[in-house]
Every structure is written in C-alpha cells, then in structure tokens.
Amino acid sequence: MNIFVADNILHMASVTSQPSPPSGSCSVVNSELKRFGEKTSIRGIPRAVKSSDMILTVTWWFAVIVCGLLLLYQLSSIFIGYFTYDYTTVIKTDNAPSVSI
C-alpha cells in the first residue's frame, strides 16, 4: 500500500471519529466559557465553576465579585488621588541686565 494512501486513510479515520460540535452558537459559547472557567488561573473562578454544591458555588462567585469590586475601588481612588494632587510650581527668574554686543 502506498504511504500517501495510508496517511489519507488514517487522517480520514481521525477526522470522522472526532465529535461534532454542539449545534447552536449559544451552546458553543457556554461550553467555551465553562472550559475557560475551569482552566483559568484567576483565583476562585475554577472553584466556583467546578463546585457541585450550590452554596459553595454562590459563595465563591460572591467572593470573586466582591474582590473584583474592591480592586476597582482601590485603583480608582489611587488614580483620582494621583491626578488631583495639589502641587505648586515656583518659577524664579533673575533680573540680570541684558548683554548686547
């Protein structure tokens, strides 16, 4: 058997054995969001997604949202404080006579 034909047969077998994507774009988005939630390195989100207990899931999501809001509050207060900081500029000029040649 030709190597090219054997490669094509193996390729076709692997293509046909793959599961078809779920129908509808909403289910694709949901499955991708769930996969992202399970694999992300953002603390708390994988535990909220993987938890089977509803109380733990709600607790983890509450903690993640509260911490995110605290982060936004602290960042905004830092930037507001930085950009509204009062400063005084003193410009000093010498009243030296002009030199002309």
Image (cartoon, rainbow, N blue to C red):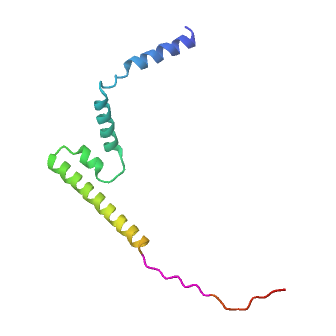
Total marks shown come to 0
Q: Nearer the viewer, residue 21 or 50?
A: 21
Residue depicted at x 81% and y 86%: 100
Foreground residue among 1 and 79: 79
Percent from the top left, x then y, of residue 77? 35, 68
Considering every residue shown, the one lying at the far right of the view is 101
Residue 21 versus residue 89 in the image, above or below: above
**Residue 8: x and y, percent?**
50, 14
The answer to whether residue 89 is magenta is yes
Q: In this image, 58 relative to 30: left or right?
A: left
Q: Which residue is at 66% across, 90% downward?
A: 94
What residue sits 24% from the left and 48% below the top?
Answer: 48
Q: Quadrant of residue 16?
A: top left
Q: Is residue 82 above or below residue 4?
A: below
Place of residue 40 in the rendered image (x, y in percent of width and height, measured from the top left): 36, 47
Name the side, left or right, on which 53 lies relative to 4. Answer: left
Quadrant where the N terminus lies?
A: top right
Percent across and percent down for residue 17 are 37, 19
| Residue drawn at point x = 43 percent, y = 79 percent | 86
Q: Which range is magenta?
A: 85-92
Q: Which quadrant is home to the C terminus?
A: bottom right
Residue situated in front as seen by the camera: 78 or 64: 78
Q: Is residue 46 magenta?
A: no
Judged by its main secondary structure, the magenta piece is: loop
- Say if 76 sits above or below 96 in the image: above
Quarter residue 68 falls in: bottom left
Q: Work out whether 82 lies above or below 22.
A: below
